[in-house]
Image (tube, rainbow, N blue to C red):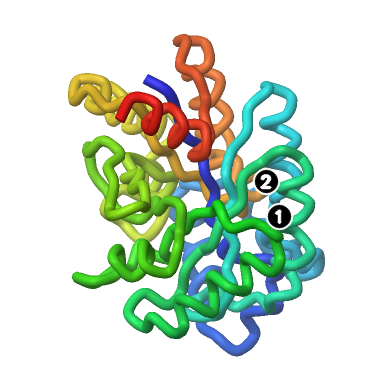
Amino acid sequence: MQVILSHDVDHMTVWEHWKDPILPKYYVRNSLELSMGLITWKEYGLRWADLWRNQWQRIEEVMVFHEKLGIRSCFFFGMANGKGLSYPLHHGEQWIPKVLTRGFEAGVHGIAFNDEAAMRQEHADFQRISGRSDFGIRMHYLRQDAHTFERMERIGYRFDATAQGMVPPHRIGRMWEFPLQEMDGWAMDGSKRYQSRDLKEAVSHTLAKLDEAERAGLPYFNLLFHDRYYTPAFATWMAWYETLVRELKQRGHGFITHAEAMAQLERTA
């Protein structure tokens, strides 16, 4: 079984959130995690220091980590604002060409899921920025309704990674659907709204999901890590990701992009 790694770029700066409730909720959560002994004073201090650094993305750091291991992954960028995704389009215009030039994949982190006109605008903006037409999408917060996927296919997305579950990739019209099997928040938070597992427990949770996927005969394991957490300010999250990637590599699992996976699937279709 091969592994597809991806990253939802939900934030770029701290102060892009000055008008929404993200910041107060974030610092209340930090204080709760500190009081419960779930994070260290160092992590707590580094999270406050982000206010002055004004950086909440770690795209470069994630790419460097992957390049050292010879791995490529996919970054999904927001083209519109909504539900806590607040950065302006010019951040995507800055980063998408950099990601593509380095050999990584890039796609849309969708906001509109039930408004086809707004969905088409997101697709058009990404196509203009990337200069490509063979890209995919994952919806922010995995939002969807009964017609979201058919709209995506009609608009022209090459693939989607919004669905969830131990289900193999499958076609929706001309579009490939790559269901998501695991993400950082599911491993680290569980059913809570704050970090509730330590490193060992979180890694065990994900490896159990991997074993379940292998028993189900899935050809690919779709793993989401939000780039924001690749920092010592989220030491356990960062360690979870590094530990998993190295463990998967040691176990002999290959790493593959969506484009490579689609090529494989279409050769055997």
The residue carrying mark 1 is 46
The residue at the point 75 percent across, 35 percent down is 64
The residue shown at (68%, 69%) is: 128
Q: Residue at x 74, y 42 (%)?
A: 61
Q: Are marks 2 and 1 in contact (CB under 8 Å)?
A: yes
Q: Is residue 61 above or below residue 264?
A: below
Q: Quadrant of residue 168?
A: top left
Instruction: Identify residue for label 2.
Output: 231
Element type where label 2 sits in the image: loop
Q: Residue at x 43, y 69 (%)?
A: 155
Residue 24 makes an appearance in the image: no
Q: Is residue 102 left or right of residue 84?
A: right
Density class for disc 1 (Cα within 10 Å; few <14, some 14-19, many ≥20) is some
Direction from residue 32 to residue 180 in the image, left or right: left
> Label 1's element?
helix
Left or right: 146 in relation to 187: left
Give whichever of 26, 240 is nearer the camera.
240
Up/down of 252 relative to 261, above or below: above
* Position of 180 relative to 244 (above/below): below
Quarter of the figure with the C terminus: top left
Relative to 3, 123 lies left or right: right
Mark 1: which amino acid? Leu
Q: Nearer the viewer, residue 110 or 33?
A: 110
Q: Report the Cα–Cα distance between label 2 and label 1.
A: 9 Å
Which quadrant of the figure contains the N terminus?
top left
The residue mark sitting in front, 2 or 1, is: 2
- The answer, for residue 129, to whether it is visible in the render is yes
Residue type pointed to by label 2: Thr
